[in-house]
Image (cartoon, rainbow, N blue to C red):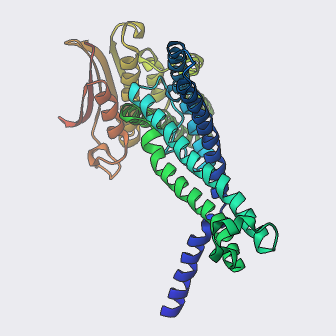
């Protein structure tokens, strides 16, 4: 067992040691570094030309100095530009295999610190590219000359390098192989250094990271809100459908007309649930605010103006519901407040119908002390079951509490004088 493990570790070590010679990532990194070396060569040639002009005593120094200053501004500006940084990020993903989660697409206008970090990456790319390119330009001709000399072709080069080397053809081949092998290992080392520097130099700064975290938190909160929408609307429709289907099954022979009314109520509840589901799915598919607004226009959100229809559905399901609505029109209330108040009443009414069947329910919505107050109450059953609200089961109360809390309101739910009372207070200030 120990011998097998040692052999396996030795093979893995050997593969890791030889990976720069066989990996396609080394080739991609080499291409990226050669591009940097070519750019570095252009900068070097430009600098050498100005040095030569300054060294010539016949050259007008003032004119050359002004030209050098203008040229320096022109050639040093690109590393600070946002499009160049975006191109560098795309190139690093492609040639250095850096994950997009580490280097996301740049968003917004880069800060001054971000521009300087991008310029530092540009300089590092050029320096390492120049080293690798120079090694390529030296190693390949040297290895070619050594191989040719080893086979007896043009040994004058080796004679110039010393008599010891000139008399050892095997050493020529070994030196040629060493020169060629040093290239991929040097490229792999430069690739490793670039990959380690990519995130601190090209990645988002602290401000961008905070913005991304805030956007992620907003997306999660929006998903939670949509989940509550589906829970409340579909849960209510399923409760009404279940009760009406049971009533229709009992009355289909004794009272066909009542059975037809129950089936009509099932159809109406299903249509309402489909409309709510279409609204939520439209919001999920919306990719921007305009699309979201369009979805909202296609399927308007529920408001307290829809409470009479909601109560009628519950009455058709066989529940005695009394509605006391003393509020202005929904258009005069904040849209979010009116919508959340409707959902709280809907969930509370659904719980009452489900957990206390046959008991009368009272729904009151009114304005009091600068707040919109929604209250749903029903007598508690004589023999509570594990499904009754008093046991605290289900997600309904939790969802209602989240809705009220998001609008800085207060939710009270529990038994009060023999009734189960849900009271939500939404401040309007």
Q: Nearer the viewer, residue 417 or 211?
A: 211
Dividing the picture into quadrants, the one containing residue 275 is top right
How many numbered dots are placed on residues in this image? Answer: 0
Q: Residue at x 68, y 79 (%)?
A: 168
Left or right of residue 140, residue 153 in this image: right
Q: Is residue 87 left or right of residue 328?
A: right
Extreme residue toward the front, this view = 57
Above or below residue 163? Residue 366 is: above
x 54%, y 37%: residue: 241
Q: Position of residue 126 (x, y in %)?
A: 55, 41
Instruction: Give residue 336's position: percent from left, percent from top.
Output: 39, 19
Give the residue furthest to the left: 417
Front residue of 11 and 319: 11
- Is residue 268 in view from this perspective? no
Give the residue at x 72% y 58%. Answer: 141
- Tell which of 136 and 419 is nearer to you: 136
Q: Position of residue 171 (x, y in %)?
A: 66, 77
Image coordinates of residue 364 in percent, x first then y, are 30, 20
* Vertical relation: 125 (above or below) 410: below
Q: Give the left or right position of residue 276, taking residue 172 as reference.
A: left
- Quadrant where the C terminus is found in the figure: top left
Q: Nearer the viewer, residue 119 or 258?
A: 119
Left or right position of 289 against 350: right
Rendered residue at 58%/50% (across/down):
96
Residue 110 seen from this side: yes
């Amino acid at each position: 067992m120990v011998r097998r493990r040692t052999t396996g570790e030795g093979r893995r070590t050997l593969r890791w040691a030889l990976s720069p010679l066989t990996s396609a990532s080394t080739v991609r990194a080499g291409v990226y570094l050669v591009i940097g070396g070519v750019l570095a060569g252009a900068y070097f040639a430009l600098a050498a030309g100005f040095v030569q002009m300054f060294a010539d005593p016949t050259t007008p120094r003032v004119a050359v100095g002004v030209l050098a200053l203008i040229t320096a501004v022109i050639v040093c500006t690109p590393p600070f530009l946002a499009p160049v940084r975006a191109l560098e990020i795309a190139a690093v993903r492609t040639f250095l295999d850096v994950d997009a989660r580490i280097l996301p697409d740049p968003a917004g206008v880069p800060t001054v610190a971000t521009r300087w970090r991008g310029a530092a990456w540009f300089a590092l790319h050029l320096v390492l590219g120049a080293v690798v390119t120079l090694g390529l330009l030296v190693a390949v001709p040297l290895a070619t000359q050594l191989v040719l000399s080893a086979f007896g072709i043009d040994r004058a080069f080796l004679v110039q390098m010393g008599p010891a080397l000139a008399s050892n053809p095997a050493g020529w081949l070994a030196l040629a192989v060493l020169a060629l092998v040093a290239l991929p290992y040097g490229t792999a080392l430069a690739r490793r250094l670039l990959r380690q520097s990519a995130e601190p130099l090209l990645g988002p700064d602290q401000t961008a990271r905070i913005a991304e975290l805030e956007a992620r938190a907003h997306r999660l909160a929006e998903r939670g809100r949509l989940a509550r929408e589906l829970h409340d609307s579909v849960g209510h429709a399923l409760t009404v459908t279940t009760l009406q289907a049971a009533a229709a099954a009992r009355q289909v022979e004794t009272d066909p007309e009542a059975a037809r009314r129950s089936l009509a109520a099932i159809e109406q509840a299903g249509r309402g649930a489909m409309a709510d589901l279409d609204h939520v799915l439209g919001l999920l598919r919306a990719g921007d605010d305009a699309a979201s607004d369009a979805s909202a226009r296609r399927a308007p959100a529920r408001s307290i103006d829809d409470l009479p229809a909601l109560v009628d559905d519950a009455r058709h399901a066989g529940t005695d519901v009394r509605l006391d609505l003393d509020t202005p029109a929904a258009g005069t209330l904040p849209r979010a407040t009116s919508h959340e108040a409707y959902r709280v009443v809907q969930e509370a009414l659904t719980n009452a119908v489900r957990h206390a069947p046959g008991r009368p329910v009272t729904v009151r919505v009114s304005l009091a002390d600068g707040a919109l107050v929604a209250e749903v109450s029903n007598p508690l059953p004589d023999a509570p079951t594990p499904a009754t609200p008093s046991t605290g089961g289900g997600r309904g109360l939790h969802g209602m509490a989240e809705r009220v809390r998001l609008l800085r309101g207060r939710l009270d739910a529990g038994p009060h004088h023999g009734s189960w009372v849900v009271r939500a207070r939404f401040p309007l200030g």
